[in-house]
Image (tube, helix red, strand yellow):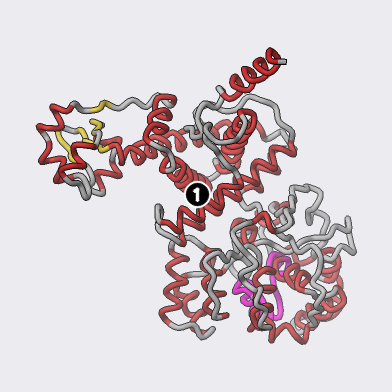
């Protein structure tokens, strides 16, 4: 029995040697085989983590107590424990394996454009820094040795000779702290963040970095390594083009939505006569914009009809009401026969009554933001991303927002935090506030608005950063497309729009 236990312990220890530290620079790609189900699950778990990292960084100052508290909660999506915990070696190995695999899976998805690379690098850097800050000095030294990061420690004699300069340059230093601090001599090009912040003493091209600031140096190494490897991954990605299993997943991970997908219609029926009033009270800005354009022009182009029509379906409009709603507007500029031939089929198709009879889901915020940017004469998309800033300000003023409130929203828009700008718009128009409140779907916005206006105490606070509280819907189903929709009005679109159509309902 003892021999068997010792053999098992050696096997566990040997496996853990593959990941000797809870932090890593992700230099070596994984070589094991995994199932498609695990591939998708790991990708989604890491996306949950990175999006929570992004939200925490926007809401709070990095390194603050509130920031660290949110990231500690978010870390449950992909935990990493120390070896001195009650976790077994097998459990520690599995945690580090999941972290390693999920990072490389998202590399494949986020190497495909500069915007995606920028977002991925920013969130991975923040996560990496948070994990490093949580290490003790002994653990940090161990990590540096395992990662081949060797920096020259200055001698006590050199530190004594440069004491006055180190005291003057080291932030909030005292005589005692200088004596207790270990300094490293590093070329200034590796410490640009510290040089920019005037936190280090520089002499003859070298920065004298206190050990407390080594995390910034290591973060720079990680940023450079990740940026370089993303470029290499992007060059290698075309080799996967022939794999019809992985590429659909990778192409949609960048705007993958985790949460309730509103496949089931709301039990509260919405009739065409109610829409004008509801649009003013409870529609998100993207849908309010589409509704106003429909009322003004008595027409919407293809992608606008898809975005708005599926939203109306999700909030409780029946097929019969939808046909009546669209027909009432469209026949103001065309005869009824043209509407029946060119548009009614699409409406029935979106409700699963034509073609392959699939139950299409309303678009999530990420899908609206990341796909099918509007062109001239279009009104779909996200107003916070796709609308000219001056026009957006004008529209917000028309919706009775105060100047200071508008600037709060525009500051988030300027930082490209479009979903958070929508959250701020919701809070300002509904007179509510919750630091953990996030919006991921236009239909979620509508539901929360109705709860607030009805005085439901559970409103807003029910939607936390903990995405595990919502049903996880994985929708990488290539069969769910609009490829067989017949639309006589497709002449309104250019050829590039038509070729994008098969991706319309992949979330």
Residue 432 on image: x %, y %: 55, 77
Task: Name the one closer to the observer, 346 or 435.
Answer: 435
Q: SS for tag 1?
A: helix
Q: Choose top left, top right, bottom left or bottom right for residue 444.
A: bottom right
Please identify the quadrant where the C terminus is shown.
Answer: bottom right
Q: Residue at x 64, y 46 (%)?
A: 45
Q: Main secondary structure of the magenta part?
A: helix
Q: Answer whether residue 395 is visible to the viewer in this image.
A: yes
Residue at horizontal 25 percent and vertical 47 percent from the top? 196
- Reading the image, the residue beneath label 1 is 119
Neighbourhood count class around disc 1 (C-alpha, 10 Å): few under 14, some 14–19, many 20 upward: some
Does 246 sit above or below residue 285?
above
Q: Position of residue 71 (x, y in %)?
A: 51, 52
Q: Residue furthest front?
A: 2
Q: Nearer the viewer, residue 106 or 391?
A: 106
Residue 487 against residue 433 in the figure, above or below: above
Establish if 339 lies above or below 55.
Answer: below
Left or right: 140 in relation to 305: left
Find residue 498 and report its horizontal and vertical position in percent: 71, 56
Whether residue 238 is visible: no
The answer to which of 392 and 193 lies nearer the viewer is 193
Residue drawn at (59%, 32%) of the image: 92
**Which residues are drawn in magenta?**
284-306
Task: Name which residue lies at 59% across and 41% down.
Answer: 106
Residue 434 % position (x, y): 54, 70
Inspect the magenta stretch and tell me whether residue 4 lies in it: no
């Amino acid at each position: 029995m003892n021999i068997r236990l010792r053999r098992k312990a050696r096997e566990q220890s040997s496996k853990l040697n593959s990941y000797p530290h809870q932090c890593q620079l992700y230099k070596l790609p994984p070589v094991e085989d995994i199932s498609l189900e695990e591939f998708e699950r790991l990708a989604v778990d890491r996306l949950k983590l990175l999006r929570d990292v992004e939200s925490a960084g926007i809401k709070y100052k990095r390194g603050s107590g509130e920031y660290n508290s949110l990231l500690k909660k978010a870390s449950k999506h992909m935990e990493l424990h120390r070896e001195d915990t009650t976790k077994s070696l097998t459990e520690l190995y599995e945690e580090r394996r999941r972290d390693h695999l999920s990072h490389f899976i998202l590399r494949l998805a986020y190497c495909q454009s500069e915007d995606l690379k920028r977002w991925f690098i920013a969130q991975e850097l923040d996560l990496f820094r948070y994990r490093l800050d949580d290490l003790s000095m002994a653990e940090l030294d161990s990590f540096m040795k395992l990662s081949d990061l060797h920096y020259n420690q200055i001698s006590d004699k050199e530190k004594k000779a440069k004491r006055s300069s180190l005291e003057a340059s080291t932030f909030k230093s005292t005589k005692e702290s200088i004596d207790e601090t270990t300094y490293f001599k590093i070329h200034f090009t590796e410490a640009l963040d510290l040089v920019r912040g005037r936190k280090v003493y520089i002499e003859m091209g070298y920065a004298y970095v206190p050990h407390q600031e080594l995390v910034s140096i290591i973060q720079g190494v990680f940023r450079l390594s990740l940026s370089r490897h993303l470029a290499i991954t992007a060059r290698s990605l075309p080799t996967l083009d022939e794999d019809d299993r992985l590429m659909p997943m990778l192409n949609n991970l960048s705007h993958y939505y985790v949460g309730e997908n509103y496949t089931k219609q709301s039990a509260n029926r919405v009739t065409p006569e109610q829409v004008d009033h509801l649009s003013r009270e409870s529609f998100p800005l993207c849908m309010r914009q589409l509704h106003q354009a429909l009322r003004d022009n008595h027409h919407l182009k293809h992608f606008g009809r898809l975005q708005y029509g599926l939203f109306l379906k999700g909030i409780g409009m029946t097929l019969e009401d939808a046909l009546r709603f669209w027909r009432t507007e469209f026949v103001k500029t065309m005869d009824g026969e043209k509407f029946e031939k060119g548009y009614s089929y699409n409406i029935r198709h979106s409700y699963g009554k034509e073609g392959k009879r699939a139950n299409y889901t309303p678009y999530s915020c990420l899908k609206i933001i990341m796909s099918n940017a509007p062109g001239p004469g279009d009104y779909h998309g996200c107003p916070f991303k796709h609308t000219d800033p001056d026009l957006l300000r004008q529209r917000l003023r028309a919706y009775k927002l105060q100047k200071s409130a508008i600037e709060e929203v525009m500051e988030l828009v300027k930082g490209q935090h479009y979903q958070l700008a929508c959250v701020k718009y919701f809070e300002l128009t509904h007179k509510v506030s919750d630091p953990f409140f996030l919006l991921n779907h236009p239909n979620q916005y509508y539901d929360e608005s109705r709860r607030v206006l009805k005085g439901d105490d559970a409103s807003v606070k029910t939607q936390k950063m903990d995405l595990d509280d919502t049903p996880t819907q994985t929708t990488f189903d290539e069969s769910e497309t609009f490829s067989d929709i017949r639309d006589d009005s497709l002449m309104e679109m250019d050829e590039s729009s038509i070729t994008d159509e098969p991706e319309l309902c992949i979330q």
